[in-house]
């Protein structure tokens, strides 16, 4: 593997955050709050957040660059030889919760992690991906999103998209509910299969593809008429988002275990959520179609 260059990654990530926030501010018509913070154990970041916007009920796009003297358990679980080593991690992570129930929630993150082996050899990898969580499914939206993911990975090998798509399906799955969180996308972690330059370029391609993957969907759905029924179902399904993030999400667990900033870590939580006991949608309704037609894993790009 080639030598890592963390400063190049940091420069890219800060620029990516600025570009995404700028595009979202233009679409929403309202500015994102900027909150720079420092972490006592080392590092810091910049949180960009909007609440009660015209389009986005809540959304955040965070940059963080943190480091520490001892790797937390969640990061060392898959690499036993690096437990307890000094480390640094940086990334951009976003979650957008539109107000309109016909506009899907979206998540994207790209990140870089580096540490060293016991003999001092650099150990590094990239992670990231994006996934779409509709409340009222739309096949055109799902296909567009998955096509964008495929195209972002295509220059780096035809085998990456099928692998990262399947990884996403497996990762964003609520085992206790036996259902997917949404219609998926791509997910990858511990990626260093290419030399540093190639791995970095792949991560950049994923980050750069986000606006093209999601903004056309948001633009098309943000003004769809809706009523209390749709808002109620949206709040119910948002509960699944909370369950996944608090129980399964590796990024959330890493942030909390490593002493990260709680406000930034929990930025992904939706603003209005409901739970009901053993509720099921009525057969034949648009709400039922989400469960039968969209949440089951499928190849959205099949002919």
Image (tube, rainbow, N blue to C red):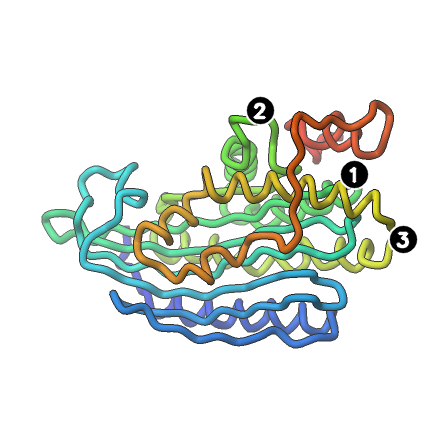
Q: CA distance from mark 2 to mark 3?
A: 31 Å
Looking at the image, residue 97 lies above or below residue 160: below
Disc 2 target residue: 178
Looking at the image, residue 110 lies above or below residue 274: below
Q: Quadrant of residue 241?
A: top right
- Whether residue 298 is visible to the viewer of this picture, yes or no, is no
- Under circle 2, the secondary element is loop
- Under circle 3, the secondary element is loop
- Measured from the top left, where is residue 67 in percent x and y? 27, 62
Q: Residue at point 17% right, 48% down?
A: 84
Q: Residue at point 70% right, 34% down?
A: 300
Q: Quadrant of residue 180?
A: top right
- Measured from the top left, where is residue 229 in percent x and y? 83, 43
298 sits to left or right of 48: right
Specify which label sits upstream in the sequence, 2 or 1. 1
Disc 1 target residue: 139
Specify which label sits upstream in the sequence, 2 or 3. 2
Disc 3 target residue: 225
Q: Which sits in the foreground, 161 or 243?
A: 243
35 sits to left or right of 41: right
Specify which label sits upstream in the sequence, 3 or 1. 1
- Measured from the top left, where is residue 287 in percent x and y? 79, 34
């Amino acid at each position: 593997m080639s030598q890592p260059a963390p400063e190049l990654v940091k420069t890219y990530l800060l620029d990516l955050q600025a570009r995404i926030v700028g595009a979202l501010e233009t679409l929403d018509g309202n500015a994102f709050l900027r909150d720079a913070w420092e972490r006592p154990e080392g590092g810091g970041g910049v949180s960009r957040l909007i609440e009660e916007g015209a389009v986005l009920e809540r959304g955040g796009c965070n940059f963080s660059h943190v480091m520490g003297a001892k790797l937390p358990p969640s990061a060392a679980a898959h690499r036993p030889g690096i437990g307890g080593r000094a480390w640094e991690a940086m990334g951009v992570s976003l979650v957008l919760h539109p107000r309109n129930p016909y506009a899907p929630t979206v998540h994207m993150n790209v990140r870089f992690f580096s540490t060293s082996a016991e003999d001092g050899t650099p150990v590094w990898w990239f992670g990231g991906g994006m996934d779409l969580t509709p409340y009222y499914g739309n096949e055109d939206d799902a296909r567009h999103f998955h096509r964008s993911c495929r195209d972002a990975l295509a220059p780096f090998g035809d085998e990456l998209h099928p692998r990262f798509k399947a990884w996403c399906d497996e990762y964003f799955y609520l085992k206790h509910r036996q259902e997917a969180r949404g219609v998926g996308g791509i997910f990858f972690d511990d990626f260093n299969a290419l030399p540093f330059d190639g791995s970095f370029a792949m991560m950049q391609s994923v980050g750069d593809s986000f606006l093209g993957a999601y903004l056309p969907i948001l633009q098309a759905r943000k003004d769809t008429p809706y009523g209390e029924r749709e808002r109620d179902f949206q709040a119910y399904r948002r509960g699944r988002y909370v369950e996944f993030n608090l129980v399964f999400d590796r990024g959330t667990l890493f942030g909390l275990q490593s002493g990260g900033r709680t406000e930034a870590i929990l930025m992904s939580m939706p603003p209005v959520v409901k739970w009901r006991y053993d509720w099921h949608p009525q057969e034949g309704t648009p709400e039922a179609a989400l469960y039968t037609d969209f949440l089951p894993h499928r190849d959205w790009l099949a002919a």
